[in-house]
Image (tube, rainbow, N blue to C red):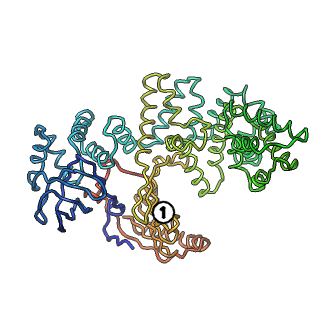
Amino acid sequence: MVHIPAQITRGDIRQTVSQKITLQPGQLVTGRAIKFFANQHAQIQIGNMSLFAQLDTALQANQTYLFQVVSGEQKPQLKKLATISNETPSTEIAKFLGINQSKETDAILREIVARNLSFTKHQLESIQSLLKQHGNSSSHRDIAFHMLEKGLPLTTDTFLSIRTNRSQSFSHLVGMLQEQLSKSNIPEMVDLRSQLSLYTKGTSEGRQSVLQAFLNKHQGVLAPVLEEITGSSMNQIRSIIQQPGNQEFITLKNRLLQQITLQLSGSKSELHSLQLLYNKLAGRAENQQPIPNGEWRVLEQHPLTQKLLLRADSELKQTFDQVSGSDQQSVKSALNLIKTTLDQQLPQETTKLLRLLVLQLEGMEHSQKLPITERFLQHVHQFTQSSGLTDENQLLQMTTRQEVLSLKQALMLHIPQVPDTVAQRMEQLVHWITGAQISNATVQDGAYLTHSFQIPGGSFGLEEDMTLEFQGKKKKDGELDPNYCRILFDLNLANIGETIITLGVQKRVVTITIFNNQEYEAQAFAHKWKSNLEQQLENLDYHLSAIHWKPLSNEKSNSIQPNGDTGHTEQQKGFDWRV
């Protein structure tokens, strides 16, 4: 178990996962030899991490050196450039880099050495350029060094993305953009306003106004489809939508979801080619003619048939598996499935509008009576899928076609079409999402897995975003082990103020520690909910061992973490959830 001292800071509580050192030829790095081996091999200490390397010359133990990476393979080769001391490391490094000394250069080099970061002359020049352009503040240096450590492009776009993500609240940016779009009253922005409404804390009246504007704009396309799906007139549908949470509302949403599920998201050419294949094979079956195996395989391997089989249940998959060209009954059953699917397909634009409509209905329903756990999980899923966090991954995988533009894509599409003041707000939001994509890295270290990301808290009535970090131990099959995990909640509560709760799990035994400077009030709240918590844990086959209370220091930790990531100057609010 992790020991937590009685007097603790937010930085102390956060655990870090040691990362493997990645070296590239040409980089410079400072380190010291701590153990020597034959043939000019040594164990080199770089910060809190070490590596086994081959050297070009003999070294002295516990002396700090400036090395240049000759080869960054599994067994790195290092060339000693200079012996350095804590008093004058930057002078020696600048000399070997062939750059002019200055106060700014000296400060940057000293901090790079203190963080034990590897770098090149070009990377140093890029950092200098970024800090000259955006200001040489401690927070900006922290961002630049974070970019260097993570191997990110040292560009202005990357810098602005990380800075915006760290210093701004997604919910706040969305709210300001939504307000500007509402004042501008640009008809082309109706769909974008509908997407933004998914993430705001706005009133039910405000959500209804956005939704009704969306229906007004697309009534010509949506009305006949909605009336056919639901059997209700458009006026009846508008009335149902105004009462989220009742049974008619839920039935409407579920019917739309069912219709969307039936869509294969195929292009016109794909749908046309599948229709031609069906017509050809259905004609053969109608005339009692056997279907050659080659022709059947063409149908079976069609992209839309593959999509259909991926989402089909086991009975439908078995129907296709049992098809034989000479078995008329199995052929007809499979062809009927293709025909039914083709008849249910809607134009892509209509499907996009239905998906956006359903997202808005779900957002309105979540604000009503759904259990908080279900609302939270659906909110996380909705945000990761619709915000743009997974855009690049979807393009890389090419497993599915994206029916609705993500929020990031929609913003980038509209930026050239709006006034400069609105465009600046849109660019900020694009930077935030890009910064979240950059920061949402999954770190694997041996048997442990860590993943962190932020989600907006507006739909839960929170002013700030929620920062989540998942950390768990992997089993032999790669799955996370629920018997060993750590959960950390970082909260700012209305009644008891800043509160950090750590929850440790070992062999399904749970121990909770609450850090809060109002110890009496914290104990009162914890005691009130203890029995219910014990019961809920027992329902999941977990056992509550104990609840402890400790004071929380308000001072921030300024020490450099093992992975080189210092505490942000911007205060991180919400909570972190480590599993």
Coordinates of residue 225 in the picture (x, y in percent): 76, 33
Q: Is residue 124 above or below residue 502?
A: above
Q: Quadrant of the N terminus?
A: bottom left
> 510 and 149: which one is in front?
149
The residue under label 1 is 579
> Which residue does the image show at 52% across and 40% down from the upper left?
395
Coordinates of residue 493 in the picture (x, y in percent): 45, 57
Q: Is residue 566 in sight in this rendering?
A: no
Mark 1 is on which residue type?
A: Val
Q: Is residue 84 above or below residue 186?
A: below
- State the image quarter where residue 80 is shown: bottom left
> 520 and 199: which one is in front?
199
Q: Residues within 10 Å of mark 1 (few under 14, many from 20)?
A: many
The residue most toward the right is: 287
Q: Is residue 75 left or right of residue 515?
A: left
Q: Is residue 534 in sight in this rendering?
A: yes
Coordinates of residue 526 in the picture (x, y in percent): 49, 69
> Which residue does the image show at 28% across and 54% down from the upper left?
564
Q: Is residue 190 left or right of residue 466?
A: right
> 397 and 99: which one is in front?
397
Coordinates of residue 48 in the picture (x, y in percent): 25, 62
Q: Is residue 170 left or right of residue 532?
A: left
How many discs appear? 1
Callout 1: SS: loop
Q: Is residue 421 above or below residue 78?
A: above
> Which residue does the image show at 22% across and 46% down from the upper left?
26
